[in-house]
Image (cartoon, rainbow, N blue to C red):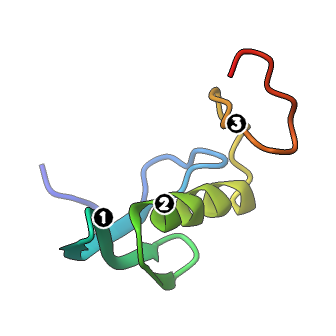
């Protein structure tokens, strides 16, 4: 079965990415992420920066809120 250039279904809030890791240096990744749906590319300098770019793209694409919670200095953490 061949791959089609068109998507068979569209998931609201879904986003497709192409991640190219160019270097592994200082125990992290450097490379480029291509947000396919928006046709935008951005270089990242660390795994953390890549994660933040992916999270921002998901928010911009209307993705539902994640089922996980990242601790923040803005939120009071009771159980560390």
At a point 76% along the width and 42% down the height, the residue shown is 72
At a point 58% along the width and 61% down the height, the residue shown is 52
- Are the residues tagged 2 and 1 within 8 Å (C-beta)? yes
Q: Position of residue 34 (x, y in %)?
A: 42, 76
Residue for badge 2: 48
Q: Secondary structure at mark 1?
A: strand
Q: Is residue 6 visible?
A: no
Q: Residue furthest top?
A: 79
Disc assigned to residue 71: 3
Disc assigned to residue 58: none
Disc assigned to residue 28: 1
Residue closest to the eye, 70 or 37: 70
Q: CA distance from mark 2 to mark 3?
A: 14 Å
Q: Residues within 10 Å of mark 3 (few under 14, many from 20)?
A: few
Query: Is 74 positioned to the left or the right of 46 in the image?
Result: right
Q: Residues within 10 Å of mark 2 (few under 14, many from 20)?
A: few
Q: Residues within 10 Å of mark 1 (few under 14, many from 20)?
A: few
Q: Position of residue 39 (x, y in %)?
A: 52, 82
The mark that comes first in sequence, 2 or 1, is: 1
Give the quarter of the image for residue 47. Answer: bottom left
């Amino acid at each position: 079965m061949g791959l089609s250039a068109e998507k068979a279904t569209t998931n609201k809030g879904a986003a497709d990415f192409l991640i190219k890791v160019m270097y592994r240096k200082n125990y992290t990744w450097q490379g480029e992420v291509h947000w396919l749906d928006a046709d935008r590319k951005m270089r990242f300098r660390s795994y953390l920066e890549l994660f933040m770019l992916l999270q921002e793209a998901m928010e911009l694409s209307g993705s539902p809120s994640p089922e996980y919670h990242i601790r923040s200095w803005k939120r009071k953490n009771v159980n560390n």
